[in-house]
């Protein structure tokens, strides 16, 4: 689980600089509690993962049993925005291969 969160954090950290452009194009932002409430009420999504990005932004993945998912990003100053959303969410619990073994 720790490796999964590290991978998520690193992966999403690379996407954070693009959030400024998306915000200019109408990214949904608001208070964290309001956005979480909307995700739960509209889509029945609950938090499935959380990670800390290199710039100290908090990344949260919300998903529902229906497969819908959303990613919220909360910046150090407190601003929270819906970064991405979609369908077909699947939770994985992969392990790293043993060193020296074939992939």
Image (cartoon, helix red, strand yellow):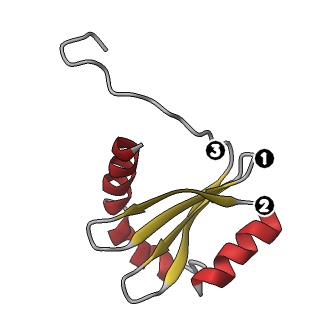
Contact between marks 3 and 2 (CB within 8 A): the answer is: no
Residue at image position (39%, 50%) is 5
Residue at image position (78%, 60%) is 44
Residue at image position (78%, 62%) is 43
Above or below, comparing residue 53 to residue 28 in the picture: above
Q: Which mark is residue 44?
A: 2
Check the image and name the residue furthest to the right. 41
Q: Quadrant of residue 12?
A: bottom left
Residue 38 image offset from top left, x and y in percent = 74, 75
First in sequence, mark 3 or 1: give its number. Answer: 1
Quick check: can you spot residue 29?
no
Question: Is 26 in front, or is 38?
Answer: 38
Residue that mark 3 sits on: 89
Contact between marks 1 and 2 (CB within 8 A): the answer is: yes
Q: How many residues crowd around disc 2 within 10 Å: few (fewer than 14), some, or many (20 or more)?
A: some
Placement of the N terminus among the 4 image quadrants: top left
Residue 61 image offset from top left, x and y in percent = 55, 58
Name the secondary structure under disc 2: loop
Question: Is 12 in front, or is 96?
Answer: 96
First in sequence, mark 1 or 2: give its number. Answer: 2
Distance from the alpha carbon under mark 3 to that under mark 2: 13 Å
Above or below, comparing residue 86 to residue 58 in the picture: above
Residue 81 image offset from top left, x and y in percent = 53, 77
Distance from the alpha carbon under mark 3 to that under mark 1: 8 Å
Q: Which mark is residue 66?
A: 1
Residue at image position (33%, 71%) is 17
Please state if 23 lies on the left or on the right of 5 as rendered.
Answer: right
């Amino acid at each position: 689980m720790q490796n999964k969160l590290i991978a998520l954090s690193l992966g999403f950290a690379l996407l954070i600089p693009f959030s400024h452009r998306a915000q200019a194009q109408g990214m949904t932002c608001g208070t964290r509690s309001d956005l979480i409430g909307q995700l739960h009420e509209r889509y029945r999504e609950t938090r499935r993962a959380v990670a800390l990005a290199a710039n100290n932004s908090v990344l949260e993945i919300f998903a529902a049993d229906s497969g819908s998912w959303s990613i919220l990003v909360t910046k150090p100053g407190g601003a929270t925005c819906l970064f991405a959303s979609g369908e077909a969410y699947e939770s994985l619990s992969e392990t790293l291969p043993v060193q020296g073994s074939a992939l």
